[in-house]
Image (spheres, rainbow, N blue to C red):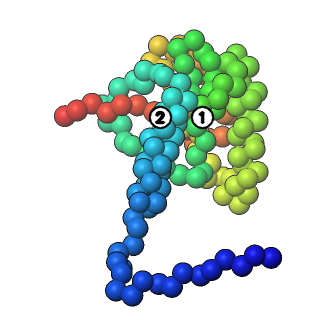
Amino acid sequence: MAKGKMKKADIGGDDEPDLTPMIDVIFLLIIFFLIAGKMIQAGRPKIDVPIAAEAIKADKDARRIEFTVDSQGNLYFLESHIGDVSNPQPLTEKIEERRTLLGADASKLQVYLRVDSEATYGDVKRVMGACAKAKQQKILFAAYTTES
């Protein structure tokens, strides 16, 4: 086997570290987070949330499950389309899956509904009926607050 010669360190050389690789990594991370942020925002269905005069912003919680109903009655779990409100079976299945994951904290599960302001009352009633069928009582609704 050929052995490579080891170079002796320069005595009195430059002690400054080479920052070029670190700067390259930082730029790559910035680009990654910009693209990932755009993809996360693009995945959510666009809806026009109603305005509520006394809305209170709820804190994010691991015991919350999010559903969206758009103006055509389509039902979404987070950003993925799971059906429509006429067949809310996937909604009840997702609630039951989350309850099994939570285990002892299953009674603290909250359903967070984002409903388009153009959706009908019947659509909301069907979703709430599906929640009741799944024995889900804690339901939060998304709304914008009015500026005072």
Pick whichever, 1 or 33, lies toward us.
1
Rendered location of residue 2, percent (x, y) = 75, 76
Q: Amino acid at mark 2?
A: Lys
Rendered location of residue 8, percent (x, y) = 51, 85
**On the rendered structure, is 85 left or right of 8?**
right
Q: Residue furthest bottom?
A: 11
Q: Is residue 32 above or below residue 74?
A: below
How many labels were placed on the picture?
A: 2
Q: Residue furthest right?
A: 1
Q: Is residue 17 above or below residue 117?
A: below
| Disc 2: which residue | 38
Q: Residue furthest left?
A: 148
The residue depicted at 47 percent of the width and 84 percent of the height is 9
- Asked if disc 2 and disc 1 are in contact, CB closer than 8 Å, the reply is no
Q: Quadrant of the C terminus?
A: top left
The residue depicted at 53 percent of the width and 24 percent of the height is 45
**On the rendered structure, is 120 left or right of 107?**
left
The residue depicted at 51 percent of the width and 40 percent of the height is 36
Q: Which mark is residue 78?
A: 1
Q: Quadrant of the N terminus?
A: bottom right
> What element does badge 1 sit on?
loop
* Residue 92 visible in rendering: yes
Q: Amino acid at mark 1?
A: Leu
* Residue 140 visible in rendering: no
Q: Is residue 36 above or below residue 146?
A: below
Q: Residues within 10 Å of mark 1 (few under 14, many from 20)?
A: some
Which marked residue is nearer to the observer: mark 2 or mark 1?
2
Q: Is residue 17 above or below residue 56?
A: below
Rendered location of residue 6, percent (x, y) = 59, 81
The residue depicted at 36 percent of the width and 81 percent of the height is 13
